[in-house]
Amino acid sequence: MTQMTEPGTRTAPEADRRPVIEMRDISITFGAVRALDGVSLRLFPGEVHALMGENGAGKSTLIKALTGVYGIDSGVIVIGGEQHEFATPAASQAAGISTVYQEVNLVPNLTVAENMMLGREPRRLGAINVREMNRRARRTLLHLGIDVDPRTVLDEHPIAVQQLVAIARAVDVEAKVLILDEPTSSLDADEVEKLFTVMRRLRDEGVAIVFVSHFLDQVYEISDRMTILRNGRLVEERMVADTPQIELVRLMIGRELEVLDRLDRAAPQTDAESGTPVLKAVGLGRKNTLEATDLALYEGEVVGIAGLLGSGRTELARLLFGADTADTGELEVRSHKRRLRSPRHAIDRRIAFSSEDRKAEGVVGDLTVADNMLLALQASRGWLRPIPQAVRTRLVAEWIEALDIRPADPNALMRNLSGGNQQKVLLARWLITEPEVLILDEPTRGIDIGAKAQIQAKVAELAAQGLSVVFISAELEEVLRLSDRLVVMRDRRKIDERTNDDVSVRDVLEIIAGEARVEGDPDA
């Protein structure tokens, strides 16, 4: 069923109620896969419009059609009553459409101003007018309430500030439509609020904002209208205020919410202390990265690592896997002392690690799903011993089915898969190696609720079968749902460890906040 509702009230004046952009009946096919099937989208000035759907629903494809990355097979794009065709991203930008992606696409070694003006630098007598460039960048930043010196190098700032700079660049080119693709996935609560302040200011100035996020609470906090996609088709356009969250999830996944029941089932509790640790870290640390840390992981146990961004969670994971070299301490694998000088040594000892940086350290976009899935196994065998074709075919087919990877095509290019399905392929990559220890760093970040439920259920199932798991996530509810034991980190050190016996999110936050009070006030 396709339903289009009328504009809401928290928007631009009635005289401007014509859509700034309208996509009508857009269809796109990649080989045998129909990525979009007659999808329509209306964007009104002065609104935040959430684009909702599971991974693989067609959100990214629709955005890329609007921004000139993909050509469309059928359908039209209407701007100001006129049809447009965007052969390139530059053509889309010239029409007033700007995009800020989850991975900020700026030049880190240039200044803030240079990034904002890149390709449009003001000139005087043939040379770049640096003074005017800095002045203009500062004016735009101040207009948006962004307190950043435009002369500073971009890489000196955290990712949240870099995203705001990317938005400021889009504003400077006088964008009519601003597309924000998972802009909050790497931000903490304070940074999200700063981003939302800028978004509200732009909305109130008449910009149409497309907001793509899997954080439902954030969608409901900032968005006015939503378009829901499923399997490449339009489900409905809705006003956010008129759509309960539980109904939204039903519309996204196309079925009742039995899948969510699995989210509330804790992983099987194990009698960890009765056995020998599969992996044990004693005083493991690295200068300026992680203070000396102790950690024991037992068979069939899920140890959750909780903490705010920058707390040392990822740094600990990388030391456990040998991706970084420890300065202090030692590792024991099955009671044998080991020095992991590289990830290869860890793989040889049946330790697997899925990095939080899916794009840079996981996905090989120009290889197929099958090749991506088999990379770790082939590396462990050595490149002179190729995996037999029959084994390749069997393993890939088994894990495509086991993890419900879509499309179920081993020859599909990895870059054409949605984020959630890419994450499933990476999980399969490591499970194929039959590890005894699986370290998962943000395995569900930026993926939809359905794929998230599937991955969480799979982790619980594997733990029940004896796999030992280190599970890291910024979503405390997720960590608590899966973990048998909980490690809490702050300021790059472990501050607490306890059995997950009805521990609540509030308990974890109080542990972190309590530690902060002690450090800040010796009399507290």
Image (cartoon, helix red, strand yellow):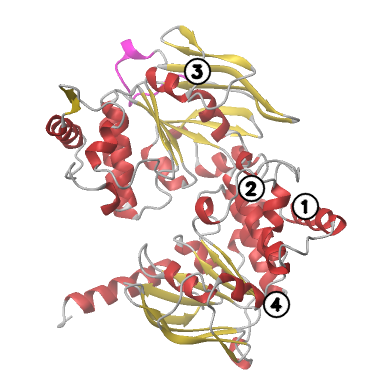
Q: Is residue 452 magenta?
A: no
Given the image, on which type of amino acid does mark 4 rest? Gly
CA gap, disc 1 to disc 2? Answer: 12 Å
Q: In the visual, does 162 lie left or right of 501?
A: left
Report which residue position mark 1 lands on: 401
Q: How far apart are marks 3 and 4 (CA)?
A: 52 Å
- For label 1, the SS is helix
Closest to the camera, between mark 2 and mark 4, is 2
Q: What is the number of the mark on residue 489?
A: none
Disc 2 secondary structure class: helix
Residue 462 vertical position relative to residue 117 in the rendered view, above or below: below
Crowding near pointer 4: few (<14 within 10 Å), some, many (20+)?
some
Instruction: Find numbered disc 3 in the image and state the secondary structure of the residue it sits on.
Output: loop
Crowd tier of the residue under label 3, counting other residues whose Cα lies within 10 Å: few below 14, some 14–19, many 20 or above: many
**Residue, disc 2:** 421
Q: Which amino acid type is shown beneath numbered disc 2? A: Asn
Q: Earlier in the sequence, mark 3 or mark 4?
A: 3
Q: Which residue is drawn at 69% across and 74% down?
A: 464
Amino acid type at image mark 1: Glu
Q: Looking at numbered disc 3 in the image, what kind of residue is underneath it?
A: Phe
The residue indicated by pointer 3 is 86
Position of residue 89 measured from the top left corner of the image (x, y, whole percent)? 46, 25
Q: Tell me where the magenta segment starts and ends, as one range.
A: 5-17
Residue 305 in picture, x, y percent from top left? 47, 71
Work out whether residue 119 or residue 310 is closer to the camera in this orientation and state it: 119
Crowdedness near tag 2: few (<14), some (14–19) or many (≥20) residues, C-alpha within 10 Å? many
